[in-house]
């Protein structure tokens, strides 16, 4: 008897919806408490931030309960416009993303009180931090619960505006204000595209309610227009290349627990919006959509990991890594669109589940890594990898949890990142079933890009962990790093345990997730648990299978064997003679120092030589007056110079021309007014 069968009699969709509503109310309460606190700076740490943990628990419980029941419940609220009330709907898709929001928010609720304690003695507004954090969560929760375009856009703007103030929290720095403005600008451009996509669908559905949009007979051409607008809008929020410019600027400057929410959760809300519109509301899937999504996903994955490898700022590196992981998610979604357009529903469901599972996995390990980066920043006041080193001695628990995140994001078994990428590969390997020779050729290329991306991710995070935690400290404040408070460790520990659990027992989790493709696509993975909970068989037991528990047992056996062998050799050697230990021969030079270690810049140098054309690189070596040499390296995003700077210059040039209209002469103004009036009358007549 399955877990769902045992629990369903005690669960109901109404209870799940009430829990989701409770999460929204608690998020609003957290914002209100912070805004009403005034000068009582301790309120954020003792009341508002712990309330976020309660929000996470309620959202997680609502999502899991709705997935177990597998039904749909909707309600109309007496809010909104007189002719357009707000509609709320809780189905399997929204339940899954509720659970994703909830699990990361629970960790932030544990982590946040200790982290924000350091802000109580600064000049930053804790009222703004707590208030906008609550509104940020409220917006994300309402986005996944909205069942009409009006409420969706209201919640979307609430999420974007509140996160803008969180990005600009340390507004005394000019680069933070610049990053916040860029984020706000691109968020509103993306929001406009999403609104236009809903407008196209509403033109044929005669309503903004999703139930009417879902049933609207949209012609193929206009369906393609709606898809393009939605893909640009949601892709901009997700940080897909080349619309990613805001992400590496905004995520690093926000407080670290907010960075974890933005990268781990907010980007997934954008994925939710794309799935809701393109898979659910439009419904008429075309193979060209899959090719476009697949190509952009490959570009984002490869460019994101290369840009991450070039970085020395830890949080900026993690931000670029989010671009890479969102690319992997959209590779899986592109595969799903391709298979669904060819009527291979089961294969489409497999790629769809792979995308959802990577959404959950990325939320866990990227949230863990951002919380770890925040702990390092809290203890050392340092983000530059070239100034770190030896942190494992000073911060052993943080080092352990960060290592779990590194192994997970590198897709190494038995951690969770391996399972979702393995599922994506299993879907891609079924391309031989397609009738189109073009598609059968494109998908193996995408698989090769995904494999190259995985190798580069491993290189990137070997660099991160080796430079930051191993070796010797490179600066005084890193040598004086102190251990993190228990609350910060508890938040990281929770996510670390889940990263391992979702890698060891994926069959149970995929059994829950399978409710989503069954509702949205009409089919699921019937063979995933055909061999029991021990084996994951996405296609069939004869094709491929994976067992996380057996991998754990194998690794434990290898470890115990190695430990026994080393102990045996040591005991045998000790019985013969005592071993005298001393420093390695140093050729008469001074003992090893931190200056002899590899830096993050040096580690990435070979890859930088190979893929140098992808970036704009300025490198020079100059000789100082005292005879010393100085190396200068500046790596910038080539998309910024090719795509964004020309647009910025065109806008500035247009603005200068418009300024000429403000001559200060009243007669000129009256003349422009008269010309405008004549033009409007001519248009009307």
Image: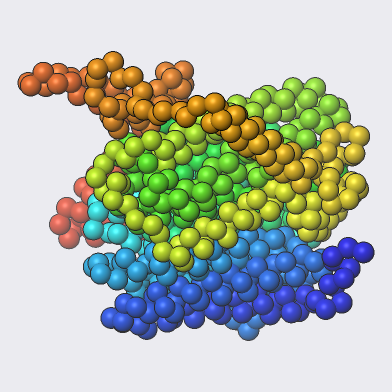
Residue at (17, 53) in percent of width and height:
663
- Nearest the camera: 91 or 98? 98
User: Can you give x and y, in whole percent of width and height, for residue 297 in the image?
Assistant: 61, 37
Is 633 on the left or on the right of 685, as rendered?
left
Is 639 on the left or on the right of 629, as rendered?
right
User: Can you give x and y, in whole percent of width and height, for residue 237 in the image?
Assistant: 52, 51
Q: Is residue 125 above or below residue 316?
A: below
Residue extending furthest toward the top: 587
- Nearest the camera: 93 or 256? 256
Can residue 525 be spotted in the picture? no
Q: How is the image coloured?
A: rainbow
- Nearest the camera: 405 or 40? 405
Residue extending furthest toward the left: 625
User: Can you give x and y, in whole percent of width and height, for residue 489 in the image?
Assistant: 48, 60
The tally of labels here is 0
Q: Quadrant of the N terminus?
A: bottom right
Q: Is residue 111 above or below residue 590?
A: below
Residue extending furthest toward the front: 576
Residue at (58, 54) in percent of width and height:
496
Q: Is residue 81 above or below residue 318?
A: below
The picture quadrant where one finds residue 406 is: top right
Q: Is residue 636 above or below residue 588?
A: below
User: Can you give x and y, in whole percent of width and height, for residue 393 in the image?
Assistant: 40, 46
Is 504 on the left or on the right of 669, as rendered?
right
Residue at (46, 22) in percent of width and height:
607
Residue at (88, 63) in percent of width and height:
2
Can residue 495 be spotted in the picture? yes
């Amino acid at each position: 008897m399955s877990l769902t069968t045992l629990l369903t009699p005690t669960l109901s969709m109404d209870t799940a919806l009430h829990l989701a509503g409770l999460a929204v109310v608690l998020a609003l309460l957290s914002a209100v408490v912070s805004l009403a606190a005034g000068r009582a700076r301790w309120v954020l740490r003792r009341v508002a931030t712990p309330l976020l943990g309660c929000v996470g628990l309620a959202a997680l419980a609502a999502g899991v309960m709705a997935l177990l029941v597998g039904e749909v419940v909707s309600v109309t609220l007496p809010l909104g416009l007189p002719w357009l009330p707000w509609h709320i709907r809780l189905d399997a898709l929204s339940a899954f993303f509720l659970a994703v929001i909830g699990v990361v928010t629970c960790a932030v609720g544990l982590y946040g009180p200790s982290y924000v304690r350091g802000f109580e003695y600064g000049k930053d507004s804790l009222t703004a931090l707590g208030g906008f954090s609550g509104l940020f969560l409220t917006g994300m929760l309402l986005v996944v619960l909205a069942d009409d375009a009006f409420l969706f856009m209201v919640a979307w703007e609430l999420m974007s505006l509140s996160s803008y103030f969180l990005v600009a929290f340390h507004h005394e720095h000019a680069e933070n204000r610049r990053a916040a403005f860029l984020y706000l600008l691109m968020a509103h451009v993306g929001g406009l595209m999403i609104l236009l996509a809903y407008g196209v669908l509403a033109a044929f559905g005669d309503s903004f309610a999703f139930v009417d949009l879902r049933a609207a007979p949209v012609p193929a051409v206009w369906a393609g227009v709606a898809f393009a607008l939605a893909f640009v809008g949601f892709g901009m929020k997700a940080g897909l290349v080349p619309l990613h410019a805001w992400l590496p600027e905004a995520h690093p400057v926000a407080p670290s627990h907010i960075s974890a929410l933005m990268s781990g959760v907010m980007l997934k809300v954008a994925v939710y919006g794309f799935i809701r519109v393109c898979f659910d509301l439009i419904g008429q899937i075309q193979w060209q959509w899959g090719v476009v999504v697949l190509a952009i996903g490959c570009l984002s994955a490869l460019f994101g990991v290369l840009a991450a490898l070039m970085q020395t700022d830890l949080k900026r590196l993690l931000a670029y890594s989010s671009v890479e992981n969102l690319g992997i998610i959209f590779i899986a979604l592109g595969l799903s669109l391709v298979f669904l357009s060819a009527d291979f529903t089961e294969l489409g469901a497999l790629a769809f589940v792979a995308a959802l599972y990577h959404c959950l996995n990325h939320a866990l390990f990227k949230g863990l890594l951002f919380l770890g980066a925040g702990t390092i920043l809290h203890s050392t006041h340092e983000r530059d990898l070239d100034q770190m080193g030896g942190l494992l001695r000073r911060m052993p628990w943080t080092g352990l949890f960060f290592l779990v995140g590194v192994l997970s994001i590198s897709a190494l078994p038995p951690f969770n990142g391996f399972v979702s990428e393995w599922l994506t590969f299993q879907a891609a390997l079924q391309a031989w079933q397609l009738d189109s020779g073009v598609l059968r050729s494109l998908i193996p290329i995408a698989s090769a890009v995904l494999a190259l991306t995985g190798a580069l991710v491993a290189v990137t995070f070997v660099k991160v962990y080796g430079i930051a935690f191993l070796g010797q400290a490179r600066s005084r404040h890193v040598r004086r790093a102190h251990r993190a408070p228990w609350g910060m460790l508890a938040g990281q520990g929770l996510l670390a345990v889940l990263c391992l659990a979702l890698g060891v027992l994926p069959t149970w989790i995929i059994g829950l997730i399978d409710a989503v493709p069954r509702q949205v696509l009409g089919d699921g993975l019937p063979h995933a648990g055909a061999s029991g909970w021990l084996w994951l068989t996405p296609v069939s037991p004869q094709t491929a299978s994976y067992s996380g528990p057996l991998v754990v047992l194998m690794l434990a056996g290898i470890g115990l064997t190695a430990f026994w062998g080393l102990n045996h050799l040591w005991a045998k050697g000790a019985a013969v003679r005592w071993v005298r230990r001393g420093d390695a021969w140093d050729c008469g030079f001074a003992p090893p120092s931190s200056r002899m270690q590899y830096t993050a810049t040096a580690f990435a140098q070979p890859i930088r030589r190979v893929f140098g054309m992808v970036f704009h690189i300025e490198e020079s070596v100059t000789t100082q007056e005292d005879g010393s040499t100085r190396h200068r390296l500046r790596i910038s995003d080539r998309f910024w110079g090719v795509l964004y700077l020309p647009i910025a210059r065109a806008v500035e040039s247009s603005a200068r021309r418009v300024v000429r209209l403000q001559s200060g002469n009243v007669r000129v103004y009256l003349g422009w007014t008269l010309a405008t009036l004549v033009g409007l009358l001519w248009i009307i007549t």
